[in-house]
């Protein structure tokens, strides 16, 4: 016969567990930090305006690339690289008028103004825009005269019938030292065609340097050609 059954005291079965200090769960903080860093890295990898324009340019999407840069220009001035890129895009898109406005507005392009204007004049010539080429080429000539540009401008002015432009070109050329008979005769002819029918009095020094320019009433063309003795100017009448 078995002995009496002994029951263990329940208090002994569930002893108190010593309380341990609780630590904050840093897992969530670490995940949040990694997410922020990942987002920052992603933002740095997003293409900027220049990269977007370059990508569109590489794809031949000139209009979209232009719109991208123009949108930025409405918010802030374009930097030098963006200005050059927009000028290049205008040239590729064959929009010389917009390129001309951009040259006037962009300081970075004005530093290398002659080269930009030369490209613009070439584009006008390719497109058959005689007036546009004449306007652009005249800016180049006024800044740095050359015989080649002088000859081309005379052709352009005659093609457009711009006698005022040709007259001012001849005066500018003579101010720079040109004093050949052909130029003098052409200038006299053009001045005869002017509404006032007033000729100019021109004194050209023996060395060919421009000396004086006036427009007195019913004057003639004068040119001093002798260098050996102080003789009075030789009067030439060109009808």
Image: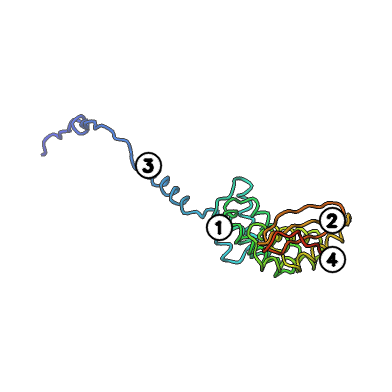
Asked whether, in this view, residue 94 is left or right of residue 7, the answer is right
Task: Residue at 11%, 36% (x, y): give it.
Answer: 3
Colour treatment of the image: rainbow
Q: Which residue is mark 4?
A: 238
Q: Look at the picture and state if 89 lies above or below 26.
A: below
State which tag comes first along the sequence, 3 or 2: 3
Q: Could you tell me which secondary element the residue under label 4 belongs to?
A: loop
Res. 222 image quadrant: bottom right
Q: Could you tell me which secondary element the residue under label 3 belongs to?
A: helix
- Tell me where residue 65 appears, x and y as whole percent: 61, 59
State which tag comes first along the sequence, 3 or 4: 3
State which tag comes first along the sequence, 2 or 4: 2
Residue 217 at least partly seen: yes
Circle 1 packing at 10 Å, graded few (<14), some (14-19), many (20+), is some
Q: Nearer the viewer, residue 36 or 219?
A: 219
Q: CA distance from mark 3 to mark 1?
A: 37 Å
Q: CA distance from mark 1 to mark 4?
A: 63 Å
Q: CA distance from mark 3 to mark 4?
A: 98 Å
Q: Disc 3, disc 4: CB below 8 Å?
A: no
Q: Which residue is mark 2?
A: 219
Q: Could you tell me which secondary element the residue under label 2 belongs to?
A: loop
Q: Which mark is residue 52?
A: 1
Quarter in which the C terminus is drawn: bottom right
Q: Disc 1, disc 2: CB below 8 Å?
A: no
State which tag comes first along the sequence, 1 or 4: 1
Q: Which residue is mark 3?
A: 28
Disc 3 or disc 4, which is closer to the eye? 4
- Tell me where residue 184 appears, x and y as whole percent: 77, 64
């Amino acid at each position: 016969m078995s002995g009496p059954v002994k029951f263990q005291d329940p208090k002994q079965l569930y002893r108190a567990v010593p309380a341990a200090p609780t630590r904050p769960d840093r897992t969530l903080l670490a995940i949040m930090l990694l997410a922020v860093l990942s987002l920052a890295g992603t933002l740095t990898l997003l293409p900027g305006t220049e990269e977007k324009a370059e990508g569109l340019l590489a794809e031949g999407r000139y209009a979209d690339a232009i719109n991208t840069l123009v949108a930025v220009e409405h918010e802030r001035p374009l930097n030098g690289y963006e200005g050059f890129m927009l000028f290049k895009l205008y040239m590729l898109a064959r929009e010389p008028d917009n390129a001309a406005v951009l040259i006037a507005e962009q300081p970075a392009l004005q530093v290398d103004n002659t080269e930009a204007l030369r490209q613009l004049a070439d584009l006008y010539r390719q497109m058959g825009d005689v007036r546009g080429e004449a306007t652009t080429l005249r800016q180049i000539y006024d800044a740095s005269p050359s015989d080649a540009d002088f000859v081309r401008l005379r052709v352009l002015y005659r093609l457009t019938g711009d006698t005022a432009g040709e007259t001012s070109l001849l005066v500018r050329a003579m101010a720079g030292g040109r004093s050949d008979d052909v130029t003098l005769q052409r200038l006299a002819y053009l001045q005869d065609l002017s509404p006032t029918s007033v000729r100019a009095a021109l004194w050209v020094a023996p060395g060919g340097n421009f000396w004086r320019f006036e427009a007195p009433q019913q004057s003639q063309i004068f040119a001093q050609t002798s260098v050996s003795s102080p003789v009075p100017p030789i009067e030439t009448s060109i009808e």
